[in-house]
Amino acid sequence: MSSGERLVPAAEPTSILSKAFDLMRAFNSDSRVMTLSELSRASGLPKSTVHRLIARLVDLGAVEQHRTGYVVSVDLLQLAANTPAGGMRDLALPALAALHRWSGHGVQLAVLRQFDVVYLEKIATHRMPAPRAGIGARLPANCTALGKVLLAWENIEDLDSFLPRPMSTMTTHSTTDVDELLLELQKIRSAGIAREREESQLGLACVAVPIVIHDFAVGAVAVSHSADVDVGSGVDNALRATAAQIARLCRDDLSRGKFRYFPREL
Amino acid sequence: MSSGERLVPAAEPTSILSKAFDLMRAFNSDSRVMTLSELSRASGLPKSTVHRLIARLVDLGAVEQHRTGYVVSVDLLQLAANTPAGGMRDLALPALAALHRWSGHGVQLAVLRQFDVVYLEKIATHRMPAPRAGIGARLPANCTALGKVLLAWENIEDLDSFLPRPMSTMTTHSTTDVDELLLELQKIRSAGIAREREESQLGLACVAVPIVIHDFAVGAVAVSHSADVDVGSGVDNALRATAAQIARLCRDDLSRGKFRYFPREL
DNA sequence: CGGACCGTTCCAGGGAACGGAACATCGTCC
DNA sequence: GGACGATGTTCCGTTCCCTGGAACGGTCCG
């Protein structure tokens, strides 16, 4: 190979930073505590590299060293709390709690990222099929009421070219047909509310309403309940009232200058 | 300076990783969206360095670029959710929600890190002096009922040498005297419950109970309410029941092998 | 004892990171 | 208009941090 002509495309530089994030992402909810060797395998990095890197992460407080392995540090919670979305969460929490107290059902707050819903808060109840995804979880938007109502407030035109095909499915009830979804979105847009039955999880139904500021849906609130009970329209009204209240709080905060955020232009 | 003899002790190498974390920490709840120059000043790093570094962080999904500046990415929520503490949060949530519904008061879940309490969940209500610190916030342990009850379950002997002097104070009612605190901790330990009135925030009172597994307090639950009402002992009992239930859930999860965590030995 | 797994240390070479300086814009003030 | 200050951006030669294979020491089986 005297002069040039590399055999492999070099497979990207992979700086230390991306390796560090690969390591952090190697932790997941299935295995919250990992040994060095497990991390090495899960991330595909050589052991010696992992050793050096994770020692530094421990120094920096991003990872905690436990007797049986390594663990994501609670300090990350503090970092994550500084997301603008975290600010919205704090703002919305009292209203969400009130809705939960009044209805007795599960209550969720979420935003849209790309084609996923990201849960910011989730007040769950015992009974019911298990809450599954917790705070920070990402779910495909087409499978949840929250996702649909958020999609419905996007520009439906460029949405068509935007959404992934094939679309993900979580249960057999999930909407996967593009045209069908677009039609449903239009209905949701005009109704101002979205419903879903067992599309994200069997035995679970959900109804969602957007938090609208200046014609933008900056987030959405939802009530979820067992699929075999039917909640009256009282829930719809309470939901709308809650979303409106949160929107008002956000707008106040925004005009006070402390917020200034959100999906593109604002 | 012809040959050697550096004037400054070089002030530590400061690898790229620590710079990256300095940048991330430059975001705080007061300014959730920051421009490049603001970041440069807040972190003390040269502009060109910030520019190069933050571009990479955006690539990696740790930071989002907004029209008006940079913002911590919501992806961090997902990372932070993989803390073992996050697992405890998910486990405890239904019980916390039930306690909130039953009592109508604010409910908190927290763990101890060093001498601080770290809030894992906080279900707040409107009325009341404002919730202040949100999820992930760290508060000095001696100023809150949660902190005291967690301290009381540590080894009180080595605690004496452990705690910082002078101790922090948040209001004029905060306990700052070491001996007084140690005495109080012993009472709390035998009573199994801690109370606090306006020590962390004026107008706010709080009562807390530990989540005990194998004689270790892995966390604590609290109910907070306006300081000028007096809640009956019914709250005490409900709190104890809630904590016991959470402890049971943790123990189940632990014996199932999925948990395996927590303050030292376990 | 041999094997498998674990965590740890070492080292020389290469390439990523560094940050000062110069540049390109914008908005503002006289 | 023009000088100003603050912004975001690019360039580049030097430095030194990062790299990961290999070898070592430890523990726990069979």
Image: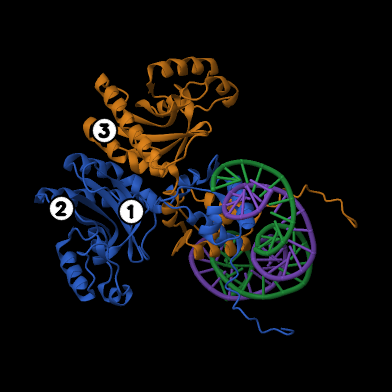
Chain colours: A blue, B orange, C purple, D green
User: What amino acid is labelled 1 in the image?
Assistant: Tyr
Are dots 1 and 2 on a single chain? yes
Are dots 3 and 1 on a single chain? no
Tag 3 residue: B99
- CA gap between label 3 and label 1 equals 22 Å
Taking B61 as reference, is B32 above or below it?
Answer: above
- CA gap between label 2 and label 3 equals 24 Å
Determine if residue B42 is in view: no
Residue toward you, B67 or B13: B13
Tag 2 residue: A227
- Horizontal side of A49 relative to C14 (left or right) equals left
Give me the chain letter of mark 3. B
User: What amino acid is labelled 3 in the image?
Assistant: Leu
Viewport quadrant of the N terminus of chain B? bottom right
Residue ID at (54%, 15%) = B179
Estimate the x, y position of residue C12 in percent, counting from the top left: 79, 64
Residue ID at (57%, 73%) = A11
Estimate the x, y position of residue A201 in percent, counting from the top left: 24, 56
Tag 1 residue: A119
Taking B220 as reference, is A245 above or below it?
Answer: below
- CA gap between label 1 and label 2 equals 21 Å
Determine if residue B245 is in view: yes
* Sequence-first disc among 1 and 2: 1
Taking D19 as reference, is A183 above or below it?
Answer: below
Q: Quadrant of residue B257?
A: top left
Estimate the x, y position of residue D22 in percent, counting from the top left: 72, 61
Residue ID at (83%, 51%) = B6
Q: Quadrant of residue B240?
A: top left
Look at the numbered disc 2 and give the secondary structure of its residue: loop
- Horizontal side of B69 relative to A155 (left or right) equals right
